[in-house]
């Protein structure tokens, strides 16, 4: 790994091999330093099938701006009039969503498309954040309402829709597929929003979050163990959650991304409270719900590690 001037370099591609996966069969990958916007660090949050990447990078004046890395160069996406921004999701067309500071001092979800950043607004409150975007340009995230509540939203066709809750005090959207189905968390429980309604999908444990959803409506995320409150990665498929375990680690695991074949990747924690420190981070090997040994197909891949560990 190339490290310059204490720069936090970006891991573009990598693969963990464990269990039934023979290390000799692992495809070699190259690590590329994407650079910065003139500062000392950058973080990648999402990548599409064309290799375009978004995230956040420090500028030469010390602020953090969303970027789009494409054709070998890093483009500063700017802000909504405030000081900072960060990209969270990118679709096949290179359109980016994330969160940016406004001139009024707030933070709003944005959509970067056609060379400009558009403010997606809120649900009547002060803030919003964009988490993911599909190939149709639909965005999900969370936004505040006029009465101060926080709700998951679906931005589509120029307007932001409140997805409601499961009866709790808040909700947030984390992942969206090309059919406009959304997953996330509502009242401490993972949900699937589809066909105009929000469905509670938790069938295991006590408390859960959906992090990603594929084209078939399969979902991965984390569920808390009933007894010791340790996170475990799960796969939701066919109306039920499957506990994916934690690769032998006692600290739990989180599923962060799922591809079209139902393969899941994420992180596992060697011990403690289900969170990872700088020297305690591990990787869940790609795992399929039927334990098949075929290789995962290519497609839109997203990195959700940072936000997962902040939970």
Image (cartoon, helix red, strand yellow):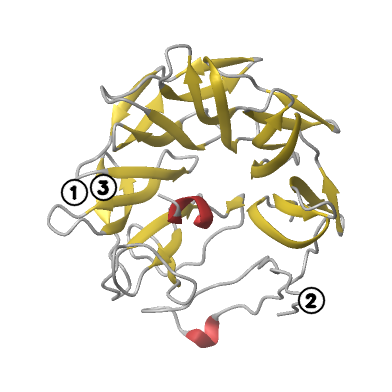
Task: Kindly state the secondary structure of the residue where label 1 is placed.
Answer: loop
How busy is the neighbourhood of tag 2: few (under 14 within 10 Å), some, or many (20 plus)? Answer: few
What residue is disc 3 on?
A: 241
Secondary structure under tag 3 reads strand
Q: x and y percent of residue 249 in the render?
A: 30, 74
What residue is shown at x 58% (from left), y 22% (from top)? 155
- Please tell me whether mark 2 sits on a helix, a strand or a loop: loop
The quadrant in which the N terminus is found is: bottom right
**138 left or right of 104 in image:** left
Packing grade of label 3 (10 A; few <14, some 14-19, many >=20) is: many
Q: Earlier in the sequence, mark 2 or mark 1?
A: 2
Label pair 3/1, CB-CB below 8 angstroms: yes
Q: Considering only order in the chain, which callout, 1 or 3, is on the residue closer to the N terminus?
A: 1
Which numbered circle lies on residue 4? Answer: 2
Q: What's the distance in space between the residues labelled 2 and 1, CA to CA? A: 44 Å
Question: Which one is closest to the eye, mark 2 or mark 1?
Answer: 2
Q: Is residue 137 visible?
A: no
Residue position for label 1: 205
Closer to the N terminus: mark 2 or mark 3? 2
């Amino acid at each position: 790994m190339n490290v310059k001037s204490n720069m936090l370099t970006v891991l573009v591609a990598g693969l963990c091999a464990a269990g039934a996966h023979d290390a000799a069969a692992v495809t070699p990958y190259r690590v590329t330093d994407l650079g910065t916007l003139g500062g000392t660090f950058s973080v990648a949050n999402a990548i599409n099938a064309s290799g375009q990447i978004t995230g956040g990078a420090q500028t030469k004046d010390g602020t953090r701006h969303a970027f789009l890395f494409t054709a070998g160069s890093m483009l500063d996406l700017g802000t909504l009039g405030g000081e900072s921004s960060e990209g969270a999701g990118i679709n096949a067309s290179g359109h980016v969503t994330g969160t940016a500071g406004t001139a009024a001092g707030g933070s709003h979800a944005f959509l970067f498309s056609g060379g400009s950043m558009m403010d997606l607004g809120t649900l009547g409150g002060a803030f919003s954040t964009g988490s993911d975007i599909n190939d149709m340009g639909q965005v999900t995230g969370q936004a505040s309402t006029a009465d101060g509540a926080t709700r998951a939203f679906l931005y589509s066709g120029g307007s932001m829709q409140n997805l409601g809750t499961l009866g709790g005090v808040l909700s947030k959207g984390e992942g969206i597929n090309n059919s406009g189905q959304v997953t996330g968390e509502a009242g401490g429980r993972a949900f699937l929003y589809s066909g105009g309604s929000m469905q509670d999908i938790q069938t295991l444990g006590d408390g859960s979050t959906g992090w990603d959803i594929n084209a078939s409506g399969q979902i991965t995320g984390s569920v808390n163990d009933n007894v010791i409150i340790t996170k475990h990665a799960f796969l939701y498929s066919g109306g039920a959650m499957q506990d994916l375990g934690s690769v032998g680690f006692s600290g739990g695991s989180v599923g962060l991304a799922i591809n079209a074949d139902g393969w899941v990747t994420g992180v596992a924690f060697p011990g403690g409270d289900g969170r990872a420190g700088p020297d305690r981070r591990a990787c869940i090997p790609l795992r399929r719900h039927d334990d098949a040994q075929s290789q995962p197909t290519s497609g839109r891949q997203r990195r959700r590690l940072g936000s997962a560990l902040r939970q």
